[in-house]
Image: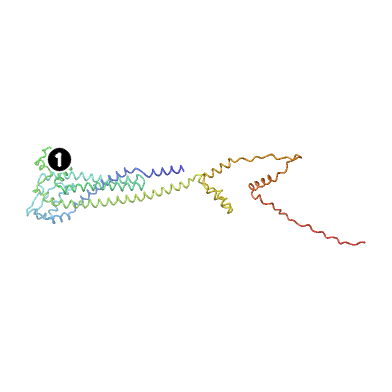
Amino acid sequence: MKQTKTKKQTKSTAKKPKTGAIRFFAALAAVLLLFGVSFFGVSAMLNDTEFIEDEYTRLGTDQEMGMTIPDLSYATKALFDYMRGNRADIRVSVRMNGEDVDDLFYHPKEVIHMEEVRALWSTLTVMAVLSIAIALGLLVGIIFFGKKNTRLRAIGTGLLIGTLVFTGVILAAGLWAIGDFNSFWTVFHFIIFPSSLIDFLSGGMTLEAYNSLNWVFGMDYAMIRMLDELFLPLVLRAGIIFAVEIVALLGVGLICYFRGKRLDQAGSDLVEVRVVEEEERFVPVEDAPDLVLQHRLQNASLEQKKKLMEELRKTPEELEQEALEKTTEPEPINEPAEESEEGFPAAPKPEAAETQKSARKQSVPFADFEPIDLTLKTEPEEEDEAPEHDLF
C-alpha cells in the first residue's frame, strides 16, 4: 500500500504544471496580433474609394469646397498613397469653384506634416509585420510546450487576457476622445511625434509655440477642410474593424479554454482510473484471498460451512487471543505405564482407555466408525450324512 500511495502522490503533483509562462506569452501574442491585424485593416479601409465618396456626398463636402466628388476622391487618394510611400509628393491639380488649381496642398506645414506621417506610417508597417510574425511564432512555440490539455487551457486564458487588455486600451482612448477631444488629440500627437513635444517645450509652451507645430492647422488649409468631417466616419469604421477582430479572438480564446478544461477533466479522470488499477494490481499479501480456506469452504458440509463462517467473522483481535490461549495451554503429562507382575505393561484402566479413544476420534477422521469386514462370509456346507445301513 505504501508503494501505491507514493504513485498517487506523484501523479497528483504532476497535475499542477507551471502554466504562467504559457499564459503570459499567449496574452502577448494576442496583443501583438490585434495590433498588426488592426493596422492592416485600417490601411485596407483607406483604400475603399467608394466608401470615401459616399461619405463626401453625405457630408456635402463637395459643395462646401466647390469641388466635384471625383476630384475630392482623387485628392484624398493622393494623400493616402503618399503616406504609404506609393507616391513621390502630394502635389495635386484639381478644379475648385470653377477654377483650375495646380497645387491643392501648397502650404509648407502640410508638406512637412505629411512627410512626418509618411515616416511614421513606414515605421508602423514594419512594426505590424513584426508583430504578426512574433505573435504567430509565440503561438507555434507554445503549442509544443507542456501537456496538450493544460497547454490548450493556458493558451485560451492568455488569449482572453491579452484581448481584454487591448480592448481596455482602445475603450479608454475612445472615452477620453469623447470627453475631451482637444486634449486627447494633443497628447496623441505628442506621443507619435516626440520632436513636436520638444519644440513645444523649448518654445515656452505658449499658444504661439503650439500653433507653430507642424500638425496644427487652421480651417483655411485644404487638408483640414477635406478631412475634418471625414475623420469621424473613418474612426467609426475602424472601431467596427477592431470590434470584429476582438470578438473573433475572444471566441478563439473561449474555445481553447473550455476545450482544454474538458480535456483536463477527462485526463484527471483517466489518471484516477489508472491509479485504482495500479492499486488493485499491487495487492499486499495480507489482503490476498485465502485459497485454502476457499477450497475448504467449497467442499465442506453444511455444519462445517457454518463453523468456517463463524471463524471468518472473528476479528483479528479474537483470532490472536485464541492463538495465544492455545500456546499457553499446559501440555498433558504422560504418566509411565504401570507394569504387571510378570514385567509386561499392564492393561490400561477403563477410564484411560476411554480418554485415549476420544482423543483418537478427535485427531483421526472417522475414528469413531467400526471397521467393516468386507470378506465374504460363507456358511460351511453341511456334509450329507451317509445313510445308516444296518449291516447287521
Q: Position of residue 347 (x, y in %)?
A: 72, 43
Residue that mark 1 sits on? 197
Where on the picture, by quarter, is residue 62?
Answer: bottom left
Q: Position of residue 269 (x, y in %)?
A: 40, 49
Where on the picture, by quarter, is residue 379?
Answer: bottom right
**Closer to the camera, 164 or 239?**
164
Horizontal placement of 33 versus 298: left or right? left
Q: Position of residue 173 (x, y in %)?
A: 19, 47
Horizontal placement of 124 versus 321: left or right? left
Q: Give the colour scheme shown.
A: rainbow
Horizontal placement of 209 versus 133: left or right? left
Where on the picture, by quarter, is residue 135?
Answer: top left
**Image height check: is 212 above or below 235?**
above
The residue at 15%/40% (across/down) is 197
Q: Position of residue 348 (x, y in %)?
A: 71, 44
**Closer to the camera, 187 or 338?**
338
Task: Give the class, few, some or many, for how many residues have Cα within 10 Å of label 1's Cα (few <14, many ≥20).
Answer: some
**Closer to the camera, 135 or 333?**
333
Give the position of the C terminus as an image quadrant. Answer: bottom right
Count of numbered labels shown in the rendering: 1
Q: Dot 1: what SS?
A: helix
**Closer to the camera, 109 or 35?**
35
Residue type at tag 1: Leu
